[in-house]
Amino acid sequence: MHNSYTCAVVGRYSSHPPVLTLLLLVLLCCTAGCLAAIPHRCIHGEISRKNRATGVVREIPHRGQGAMQAYTASAAITEEEKNKLNWAPIRIKAFTRDLDDPSKYCSGIGEVRYDALNDIIYCGANDILTVRMKRIIVEQIIPEAIKMHSERLSVVPTEGIKVPRMSGGYCGYFNIPEEHHTEGLVDADLYIYVSAMPSRDTAAWAVSCSYLKDKRPYAGVINLTPSYVKPTDSFIRVMVHEIGHILGYDEFTFAALNIIGTHTNVRGKKKVWIINTTKSRDVARKYFDCPNASGVELENQGAASARSHIEERNAREDFMAPGAMIGRYSVLSLAIFDSMPFYKANFDKAEPMKWGNKSGCKFLDEKCIKDGKSSFPEMVCDTPFPKVLNLCTLDRLALGYCTLKEHDYVLAEEYRYFPDNNRYGGSNNFMDFCPIVGRHREPWCTKSFSLNGEGSYVGPDSRCVKGEGLKYMKRAIGDVCVKTDCNKEKKKLRVQFYESQTWYECEEGKKITPKSFYLWSGNIICPKYEEVCDVLPNLSIVLDPLPVKEDDDNPAPGNITWKIPESAMEDRNEEGEVNPSVNDESASPHTSNGAGSQGSITHNDPTTGTTVRGETNIPDVHIGDHDTIIDPTEAPSKNVQGGTTHLPNNTAGITLNIGVGDGSVTAAGCAPLLFLVVAVAVAVSL
């Protein structure tokens, strides 16, 4: 018999007097005026903190003690001890009952749905889960995302660990088959429950729900926003990113395992967070070519991202960066997973990155721009568009522009790079406002023939090189794409310009002026051989097209084959509000009393195979006093990783859900505030 504990917060609705409710709405309106949704950023940190009861660790927080202080445990295990364990590729199963339950997705315009915290969702055309979209999720996105993790992470296998019954919070929202509560995990080390409810301004979100005694998550939930779902490499890596959070890439897990520490006065910042294990330190030193690196730095920006992501400024191509647009499963994040005692990483499967690689200690320790000049010109630019026209991207496969801009606010002191203007900086706060080269819409040296008009050669052997006063047909063009010829034996590079048959020997640092003076003026600066000739492999996941079906564009039909308990059905009044009710352990989510697991997807055989942006504002979950809610009873377990700890439901916890519009928070303005003030006055007078 396995007991388990869950970090799902138990919510209880309270009946507020009308005046108090209206006052709360006024407060929400005032708060909304200060908040704005930032499109497409990972919101895991925010969701995780609101979903997690801080008392899930055996140490009971004392009054006045912070959650991060209480949420600690020892993760001490030597490499030698780790190697003696019986490791096997992690087995992940995904269950998609919420894609069969019409109450959990949009099937028509104008429908009203309730998300995981009972916020109201008004369904639009892009929110509808179609038959084809469901097929993409079930047949393509989920298997490929699971495969990427199963290839790279191993665990000591477990059997029979039961999924606890969860009421309230994000985890209690999902349909969990009854046998998962009674029989537990079968041929799997992690169960994931998948839904497709609209979420404003984020492509996906996920959170862990249940943990083994050693803190390894074994159940979690993930929501994929229908309007973002595409059969593409980038969306697969969005899901890989979110599964990464479920696996434990999370500030609370880092703290529980005691693998997180701080450094002070780094690049002008008062404090930064790092994963400071021996493994992460050794990997960071090798990757950055910095013998002084103390570990892998974590993101410090944004309440929804801080400490639950890798520092994007240092590793922007990594799949666990908060705004990762490339999503490489790099050695840095593998080192973080390997730092957790319950995972063993396969570093042979690491995906290479260019950003920050071999950049030295200066890159980690110093600001990206000093006195208005880039300290790392191959990665960071310092002149805004259009003062400088085309610029080479870091991989030299495309042309782009400098993302430097003037903000409408003064940047924090640690992000001020231009002495004459404290508002100047890059467009991305996760990059510590370091301006980088962003790609144009049609930028590719290898395939965008529209670049011919700007003097660029286009073809498979084309690469971008730095221009110096370079003009094509008397028009300044900035950097340019040229045809390249790489002699791998001699490590020699030759280049050829557009509309020219002449080859030029191109040694590092050499300046070359094209001979076609009627077409060209100025020169190029020859790059390092390896920057052009040692091209990273194309790691994009290519999916076989799904066969077209006649009903692909129709809304996905319901297919509920399990019993929905009355306790899971919520009464709502005519205004669509949830009637006040008290959740307890008997009020379980939709479960099945029959045999078999509907919608199960498995990928156990490791072979090959992740990102997101989005910041949305979700009503606060208020958690009661945790001094009285911990039950550290343990049951014997056959699991090699020890028993599990049970956390009873916190019936003192109150969840206040105020559904406003589509659930996202935007600037409210004065008119709604005035309306609410008047409403309060009327209510008081009644």
Image: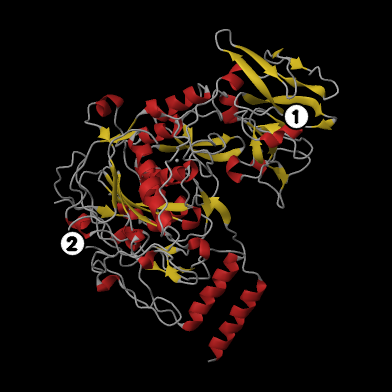
Q: Is residue 417 visible?
A: yes
Q: Nearer the viewer, residue 64 or 252?
A: 252
Q: Mark number for residue 511?
A: none
Mark 2 or 1 closer to N-term? Answer: 1
Closest to the observer: 136 or 415?
136
Where residue 274 appears, as percent x and y from the top left, is: 47, 36
User: How far apart, in angstroms, are the residues tagged by discs 2 and 1?
Assistant: 67 Å
User: Residue shown at 66%/39% (left/top)?
Assistant: 442
Residue 319 at x, y = what percent? 47, 39
- Asked which secondary structure carries label 2, the reply is loop
Left/right of residue 131 with respect to residue 88 in the rendered view: right
179 is higher (above) or lower (below) than 491: below
Is disc 2 surrounded by few (<14), some (14 to 19) or many (20+) residues within 10 Å?
Answer: few
Q: Which residue is identified by label 2?
A: 594
Residue 148 image position (x, y, % from top left): 38, 37
Q: Quadrant of residue 588?
A: bottom left
Q: Using the image, determine if residue 76 lies above or below residue 526.
A: below
Residue situated in front as seen by the camera: 72 or 656: 656
Residue 455: image tag: 1
- Circle 1 Cα neighbour tier, 10 Å, few/some/many (<14 / 14–19 / ≥20): many
Give 472 or 663, whichever is nearer the viewer: 472
Tell me the kind of residue under disc 1: Gly
Left or right, residue 347 beside residue 561:
right
- Closest to the camera, between mark 2 and mark 1, is 1
Q: Which amino acid is tagged 2?
A: Gly
Residue 95 screen position, x and y as percent: 30, 53
